[in-house]
Amino acid sequence: MATGNAEATKARILEAARDEFSAHGIAGARVDRIAKAAGCNKNLLYIYFQSKETLFATVLEQNLRRVYDELRFTPDDLPGYAARVFDFAMAEPGLMRLMAWAGLEQETGEVALRNAAQSAKVSAMEAARDADGPAARFAPEFLLTAILALATAWSAASPFGPRLNPWLAADPDTLRTQIADAVAAIAGAPRTGP
């Protein structure tokens, strides 16, 4: 089999696996459905990825890498970061469900990429922290978690926003502004982003 064909097959498998895992999680996903959607033999999945759990971990890491590559983080614009996370979460419901499944099933262990990205953000927040500023009341880890929770509260994976306030989800511009304003108030930061 040619290298180009193998890479194209792997790409199709990863795309089909993302759809399957987003819809069903690790436990509910079926390798035969992934293979059928990818247009390949089920044995190829095991040749390329060894197990369903390894395939899930690969899909999760690949998609988390996209998140970290596409979402610019600067500690001096936390409201803008929250707005960008909100936009990304609303545009990527499959990825949000995939991350929810990863959190629920916990079978894949820690994702090194996620831990490194979070540590880098926390370190940047620590370095930019004003000891006398309003955000000093909160540990950077807490503040980052609060920002991410607010920014993703209306995403496909949240049990709160879209279910409790579906009318707000119909107005993403207002939601984005309110999320950025809430983060600005919590962090004591000026509103600089969209």
Image: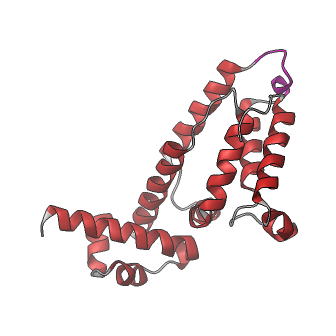
State the residue in front, 26 or 129: 129
Q: Is residue 111 above or below residue 52?
A: above
- Measured from the top left, where is residue 151 in percent x and y? 73, 50
Residue at image location 65% in from the left, 46% down from the top = 84
Residue 147 left/right relative to 37: right
Residue 36 left/right relative to 25: left
Whether residue 160 is visible to the viewer of this picture, yes or no, is no
- Measured from the top left, where is residue 173 in percent x and y? 77, 54
Magenta segment range? 130-137
Residue at image location 44% in from the left, 61% down from the top = 59
- Measured from the top left, where is residue 88 in percent x and y? 62, 54
How many marks are shown on the rendered structure? 0
Residue 118 left/right relative to 134: left
Residue at image location 80% in from the left, 29% down from the top = 190
State the residue in front, 43 or 39: 39
Whether 63 is among the magenta residues is no
Locate the N terminus by quadrant. Answer: bottom left
- Quarter assignment of residue 161: bottom right
